[in-house]
Image (cartoon, rainbow, N blue to C red):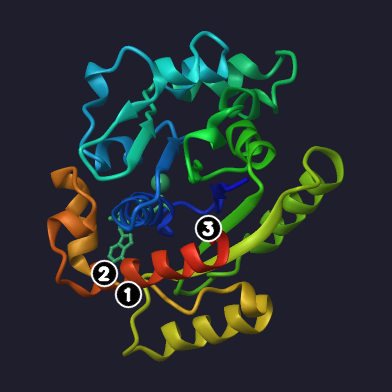
């Protein structure tokens, strides 16, 4: 089972950038990938070029049990990549589900049966450890944590690890910390290197060899609604995602 929650309760660390570009690269290398956008901001949805205002259904309807996976899933123009889109409705889901039956298992139920058609599901989590992220942790078997190479990079990671442990103990024993990816790395600065070293000391071999460099093309691509490979396949950001996808595929998707 390859359902991967991409999470870090810190905002702006590169979760969405990883989801979009990892999905696109895995798709380009022949895998079928489903990206589930679980962030009410919907940046994965718009970053894949999908017009959110034109959507009649979203992952919100799936969580509420009001639509099936097939009804919510849309194909994207990008090879091998399908999407469970997010609309603004999702912002209300935390509150609406708060008192609902089996509120933590809604996504798991919604995704049941998905593995027959998809090699991997990536879940783009919101920047909090609330009910939406909890749903991702219950649905997933792997946790992928992007960590930005900056001051206070590890701040909050302890809390994330405690949440992981609680989920493992009470809700989903199958969930494992399966990857850490360093993002927005600037090889020229000492700080960036030091953060990288510190993260590797703390997490060891779970950290991917490939770090994502800070690259302006990666920040431009979403406004064109394109993954980096289709926006500028020659930049350093694109090359890094090719490498990261290769590592992910070797580690998780070997058939
Ligand atoms: P998150 O989903 O964790 O909030 P994002 O992936 O949306 O983080 O990234 C936050 C911002 O930083 C976005 O504007 C994004 O385009 C930009 N960004 C992310 N990764 C990089 C990178 N490697 N180089 C340059 N800009 C980046
Ligand atoms: Mg995001």
Instruction: Say which residue label 3 marks.
Output: 253
Q: Is residue 216 left or right of residue 157?
A: left
Q: Nearer the viewer, residue 133 or 33?
A: 33
- Where is residue 56 drawn, in percent x and y? 32, 12
Q: Is residue 147 visible?
A: no
Identify the residue under disc 2: 237
Q: Is mark 1 within 8 Å of ligand 1?
A: yes
Observer-nearest of 23 and 217: 23
Q: CA distance from mark 3 to mark 2?
A: 22 Å
Q: Decide if ligand 1 comes within 8 Å of the CB at mark 2.
A: yes
Mark 1 vs 3: CB contact within 8 A: no
Q: Residue furthest right?
A: 169
Does residue 139 appear to the left or right of 47 in the view shown? right
Q: Crowdedness of circle 3 by 10 Å Cα count: few (<14), some, many (20+)?
A: some
The span from disc 1 to disc 2 (Cα, nearest Å) is 6 Å
Horizontal and vertical percent position of residue 117: 47, 34
Q: Which mark is residue 213?
A: 1
State if disc 2 and disc 1 touch (CB < 8 Å).
yes
């Amino acid at each position: 089972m390859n359902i991967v929650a991409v999470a870090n309760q810190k905002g702006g660390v590169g979760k969405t950038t990883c989801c979009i570009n990892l999905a696109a690269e895995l798709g380009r290398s022949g895998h079928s990938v489903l990206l589930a956008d679980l962030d009410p901001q919907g940046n994965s949805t718009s970053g894949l070029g999908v017009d959110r205002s034109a959507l009649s259904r979203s992952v919100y309807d799936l969580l509420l049990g009001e639509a099936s996976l097939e009804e919510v899933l849309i194909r994207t123009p990008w090879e091998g990549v399908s999407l469970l889109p997010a609309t603004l409705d999702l912002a209300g889901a935390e509150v609406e589900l708060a008192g609902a039956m089996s509120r933590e298992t809604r996504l798991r139920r919604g995704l049941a049966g998905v593995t027959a058609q998809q090699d991997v599901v990536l879940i783009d989590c919101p920047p909090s450890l609330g009910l939406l992220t909890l749903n991702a942790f219950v649905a997933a078997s792997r946790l992928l944590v992007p960590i930005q190479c900056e001051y206070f990079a590890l701040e909050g990671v302890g809390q994330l690890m405690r949440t992981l442990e609680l989920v493992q103990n009470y809700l989903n024993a199958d969930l494992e910390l399966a990857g850490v990816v360093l993002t927005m790395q600037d090889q020229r600065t000492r700080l960036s290197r030091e953060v990288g070293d510190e993260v590797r000391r703390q997490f060891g071999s779970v950290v991917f060899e490939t770090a994502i460099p800070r690259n302006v093309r990666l920040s431009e691509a979403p406004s064109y609604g394109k993954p980096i490979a289709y926006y500028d396949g020659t930049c350093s950001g694109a090359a890094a995602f090719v490498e990261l996808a290769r590592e992910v595929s070797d580690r998780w998707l070997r058939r």
